[in-house]
Structure formats: C-alpha cells, structure tokens
Image (cartoon, rainbow, N blue to C red):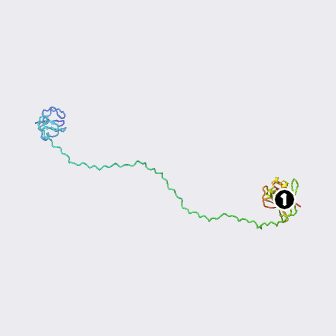
Amino acid sequence: MSTIVCPSCNTPAPAGSVFCDNCGYDLRNVAASPAVSAQTVLASPPGGGFNCPQCGQPNVPGASFCENCGAQLGQPAPAQQPPYQAPMQQPPYQAPVQQPPYQPPVQQPPYQAPVQQPPYQAPVQQPPYQPPYQAPVQQPPYQPPYQAPMQQPMGGTGRLVVQGSNANIPIPSGKPTMIIGREDPVSSIFPDIDLDPYGGHDAGVGRQHAKLLAQGGQILLEDNNSVNGTWVNRQKLPPNQPRPLNNGDELRLGKLILNFYTN
C-alpha cells in the first residue's frame, strides 16, 4: 500500500488522504510514496503513538489494532530499564551545632607607648647625722650656798607706828623671831605683835601674816605666805624671803600701813 509523507512534519499518511492527521497540511497535491518498511511503520510518530503497518495510520500508544483499518499493530520493544542502583545510605542524623550567642568584639584600648624609664642613678650617699650645734651653756660663777646669819634675840631696838592713828607698837625683846598677825583664842593663835586692836581685821591682816627676824644686828621682815600679801616701800615681798628693814621704811600688811623705826 502506498503512503503519503507530509512534507511539513514528515508524518506518513494513507494514499488519498486530504489533510495530514498530525499537522493538518493539505496533502491533495502531494504524490504518493512507495510502501514503507516495517521499521518505518513502527517508528514512533510525533506524540508517542505507532503508525499502522498496513495503512500508515497513526495510532495512540498501547493500541493493539489500527483505528483506520483494523490491522494488528506490533508492540514496540520494552524500554530498557536502567540497572538497579541501591538507594544511597543517608548519614546518621546529627543535631545542628549550637552556636554561642553573639558577643561583640572586645574593644582594645588605644595604643600607649611604654613609659620611658629614666636612666639609673645611684642613690646619693647621705652624710652621717650630726646634731645641730649648740653653744655650751655658760655656767654662772660659783657661789657658796647661802647661810643665814645666826639669829640674835631682839632687844628693844625698834617700834611700829600705825599711819593715820600714829599708834606706837613696840617690838618685844628676847626672841629671835616675832610673829605679826591677829590674835584668835578659838584657834589658839597668839601672835607676838597683835594688830587686831589697830584695825587689822578690817584691813585683811592674817592671823600669822608675817614675821620679824633678828640677824646680825639687823631686823628683817618676811611674808608668811599670807592671803593678802606684804609690801615694803610699795614692793611686794615673795613668800618666805626675808627683806632687811631700814629706819623709816613703809610696811603694808593687807591694807594696814605702818612705818618701822629704830630706837
């Protein structure tokens, strides 16, 4: 049987076909071709079907008989299967590695050049300690210790005169020491020269205010550490330091003023 080959898609068609079954090309002016071989008939037309070996009619894949002429269609050789390949062994599951939390890079301090050390200097040798110079203390010239002259008993060599009243108070004789003060029987104090009758109490004269001393034929006055003080010619006497008296000297015991006279 002769066939017609479509000049557009090269699909064979039975002789007398008006249009190509594959692409619809007009086959009325196409000349018929000699009969095709079984290899040509069995060639797969476009679309994956088979051409009938009798009439060349394309058929759907898997058809046993031609849809145009009913001829039995040969089955194409089964497709070659690729050789069996065992599935690839998957590696055992590994949990993803936990990444540590992000930490910003540590800021490095700005570069500082090393401090230049001064060249070594040996320690200065200190001179041995010398205490500051002190001039030697001038010692006063030697004086022998004071020795009071031997006390002589007083004679009737003097008297005291109270200023204002001109009262005369004789100095008793027979004793080297005479206490001047105020009599106080309650305290059993009886001075040798009692000034209480002459205003001694109001003048601040003490009970044992002062004393008269006879030394080397001279009369001395000594303050007996009194409360209101003792003066000779308006100079206050230090306590327990006797002061020689001269004729006419002014004495003050407290506020009571007297004059000393020699006989």
Depicted 174 relative to depicted 94: above or below: below
Q: Position of residue 152 (x, y in %)?
A: 84, 66
Number of marks drawn: 1
User: SS at mark 1?
Assistant: strand
Depicted 213 relative to depicted 67: above or below: below
Depicted 157 relative to depicted 98: above or below: below
Q: Quadrant of residue 15?
A: top left
Residue 46 horizontal side relative to residue 162, left or right: left
Q: Nearer the viewer, residue 60 or 251?
A: 251
Image point 84% across, 59% down: which residue? 193
Residue 38 can be seen in this image: yes
Q: Which residue is mark 1?
A: 193
Q: Nearer the viewer, residue 198 or 239?
A: 198
Q: Position of residue 246 (x, y in %)?
A: 85, 60
Q: Position of residue 236 (x, y in %)?
A: 80, 57
Q: Nearer the viewer, residue 51 or 155?
A: 155
View extreme (front): residue:
186
Residue 76 horizontal side relative to residue 194, left or right: left
Residue 83 horizontal side relative to residue 168, left or right: left
**Residue neighbourhood size for the residue with mark 1, other residues' Cα within 10 Å, grouped as few (<14), some (14–19), many (≥20):** many
Residue 13 horizontal side relative to residue 142, left or right: left
Q: Position of residue 18 (x, y in %)?
A: 15, 31
Q: Quadrant of residue 172?
A: bottom right
Quadrant assignment for the C terminus: bottom right
Residue 235 can be seen in this image: no
Q: Nearer the viewer, residue 165 or 260?
A: 165
The amino acid type found where label 1 is placed reads Ile
Quadrant assignment for the N terminus: top left
View extreme (right): residue:
263
Image point 82% across, 54% down: which residue? 201
